Image (cartoon, rainbow, N blue to C red):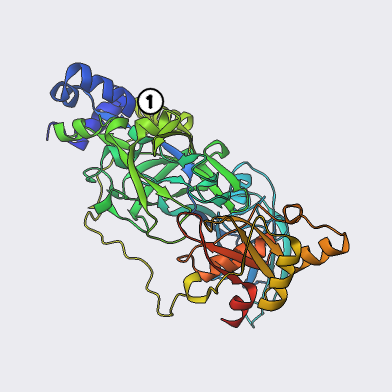
Amino acid sequence: MIKPYTEINKRIKSGDVVVVNAEEMIEIVKNRGIKVAAEEIDVVTTGTFGPMCSSGAFLNFGHSDPPIKFEHLWLNDVHAYHGNAAVDCYIGVTRMADIRPFEYGGGHVIEDLIAGKSIRLRGNSYTTDCYPLAKVDTEFTIDDLNQAILCNPRNAYQRYACAVNSTDRILYTYMGKLLPNYGNAHYSGSGCLNPLCNDPDYETIGFGTRIFLGGGVGYVIGEGTQHNPINNYGSLFVKGDLKQMISEYLKGVNYEKYGTSMFVGLGIPIPILNENLARKTASKDEEIFTDVVDYGVPRRDRPILKKVSYKELKSGYIELYDNKIKCSSLSSLFYARKIANELKKWIEDGIFFLNPPAEPLPKETEYKPMKQTSELKFVKDLKRTAVICYEDCDIKTVAEKIITQNMNHIVITDRENHLKGIVTSFDVTKAIAEEKTNLKEIITTRVIITTDNEPIEVAGRKMKLNDISALPVIDENNKVIGIITSEELMQN
């Protein structure tokens, strides 16, 4: 060890501390070497600002008169969890408002709360002898609360997968809107500024580490949920006082046709205790890699298409299958830098001191998928043979097949069995009524499809969202290998 925490904190107190952010540290090590950097630099600051869906807040309202024990409660029409004590609640950022789903959620409530806005509280109770009040409808601000604690069970992800979409339809995901046929790519994280990329072995980050959180002071209180350090997917469990925080660093957000979340600003100071930490805090974007993952495959073991560096991601494009794909970040590099620099100023001004972790974070945690005791069925388990007509058939031929095969959906293909469209019995009935004879006039060419390995719940959701009753089943070459209808799903 070159210098201990006590020496660094003495330098902070005296105003002699040397602090740089992680991007500046890269240049210092490049120009002056690891040994000199370790001796001269005391602290390296980091930052990240992105969507943290595993976030929320514990709130205590104080007792009403007469008292109430909440059974259900809503904050600005967002249902909050009551199952703590009588007037405590936990509001999660992904919980959507009952009245404005997909537009407003728990993350927006937290942002409005720390911005000083008035929040409507509605609640009801089953009543007891000691809690006789049955209903509350009131308003409060953050100053009216006894405690308001930001609590994020999973934050500061070490890295994120880069998401792409191989299907022929738009996907609406927590990684944003993914365009069909690899039309775009989305990633998150600040790369070389990311806290866990600067101390991946948790030499200085552990239980009790003091951090920048939401514009105030917070603490690491353990490893995050789904902590997976073996595969470089570490995460942190953090908390902090919402009354110290500012809405600039906590932003409610909504994702089109997916739901709500909240952007959380987080920064961690890395004390340069030794040369090894000097080396790690100088990690460059081109040395930090993540996976390009196909979100068009709806299962947990989505195929990894390639490895890509954060340097390539930040360039705005990635190379995939000899194509250049536009790449965008869901997180803010601007705010990540701002957080790292604000934390740097706090330390230089002597108002933020470093503390050694009381206990290190685990480095060998095994990440396990959900145990499923019921059998999961896939499209291949329920599909039936598709009734097919070629695209050069006439409407009469299609009508005859509907009658003889007792099938409401006729799949249209070319002679090599490639999908070209679909026709329903209603389409044919309408065409005959309008005296149409050309099949091309009634074919639906923009077809929602499925594959053998898609879970039937996903197939059913596609039908419901698109108000249709059948999905052609295709293989990897866009050839029709069957069909699944709402009838098969209802019988399951």
Residue at screen point 58% across, 49% down: 170
Q: Residue 241 vs residue 404: left or right?
A: left
Residue that appears at 40% across and 49% down:
293
Residue 6 vs residue 279, the one in the foreground: 279
User: Which amino acid is tagged 1?
Assistant: Asp
Vertical arrangement, residue 285 with respect to residue 465, above or below: above
Residue closer to the observer: 145 or 119: 119
In which quadrant will I find the N terminus? Answer: top left
* Residue placed under numbered mark 1 in the picture: 349
In the rendered structure, the answer to whether residue 332 lies left or right of residue 349 reads right
In percent of width and height, residue 201 lies at 22, 45
Q: Is residue 161 above or below residue 66?
A: above
Does residue 378 show up? no
For the residue labelled by badge 1, is the local secondary structure a helix, a strand or a loop? loop
In the figure, is residue 425 to the left or right of 73?
A: right
Position of residue 466 relative to residue 236, above or below, is: below
Q: Quadrant of residue 158?
A: top left
To which quarter of the image does residue 45 belong? top left
x, y percentage for residue 369? 35, 66
Across and down, in percent, residue 215 comes to 48, 37
Residue 376 in picture, x, y percent from top left: 45, 75
